Image (cartoon, rainbow, N blue to C red):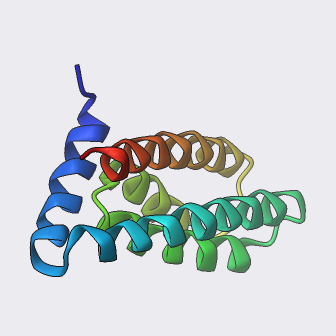
Amino acid sequence: MASEIEDGIREALNELASALGKEAISAVVSVYEENSATQVRQMEEAVIYADIERLRREAHSLKSSSANLGAHGLAEVCLKIEKAQSFDPSIASLVGDCKRLQGEAVVSMRKWRDEP
């Protein structure tokens, strides 16, 4: 049984693929996999240094790309981080949520990409 995350991503990717082709969207998914992992690492580093501006920039970028590909839960968590006005220790927990949700999103995207 597919999860809500998988369903949202599958729906978004199918819609994009119907307009642009599965091969093009598969390439976008590959780029997302690499870039989103880097963005999460950058966010984790920003937490270590309590760099709220860097954290907000990375969250904004990850939010946008994730929303475009149907990872709406991840985008929502990124929005919470992006709206942060100052560094709060609870932000580290949100970054942890981003890391988990990014991993789940990538798994769902790979499943979609590997479907015939």
In this rendering, is residue 103 above or below 53?
above
Q: Please give left or right for residue 14 compared with residue 36 in the image.
A: left
In this rendering, is residue 97 above or below 58?
above
Q: Total marks drawn?
A: 0
Q: Which image quarter: residue 5?
A: top left
Q: Please give left or right for residue 11 compared with residue 2 in the image.
A: left
Residue 95 in the image: state x and y as whole percent: 64, 50
Q: Which image quarter: residue 50?
A: bottom right
Residue shown at the point (56%, 41%) measured from the top left: 97
Residue shown at the point (18%, 71%) measured from the top left: 16
User: Where's the N terminus, which quadrant?
Assistant: top left
Residue shown at the point (70%, 54%) measured from the top left: 88
In this rendering, is residue 85 above or below 33?
below
Towards the viewer: 94 or 37? 37
Looking at the image, the residue that sits furthest to the front is 116
Q: Please give left or right for residue 90 compared with residue 41 in the image.
A: left
Q: Please give left or right for residue 12 compared with residue 37 in the image.
A: left
Residue 100 in the image: state x and y as whole percent: 57, 39
Looking at the image, the residue that sits furthest to the top is 1
Towards the viewer: 61 or 56? 61
In this rendering, is residue 84 above or below 93?
below
Residue shown at the point (77%, 56%) measured from the top left: 44
**Whether residue 23 can be seen here:** yes
Q: Which image quarter: residue 17?
A: bottom left
**Whether residue 85 can be seen here:** no
Residue 80 in the image: state x and y as whole percent: 47, 59
Towards the viewer: 113 or 38? 113
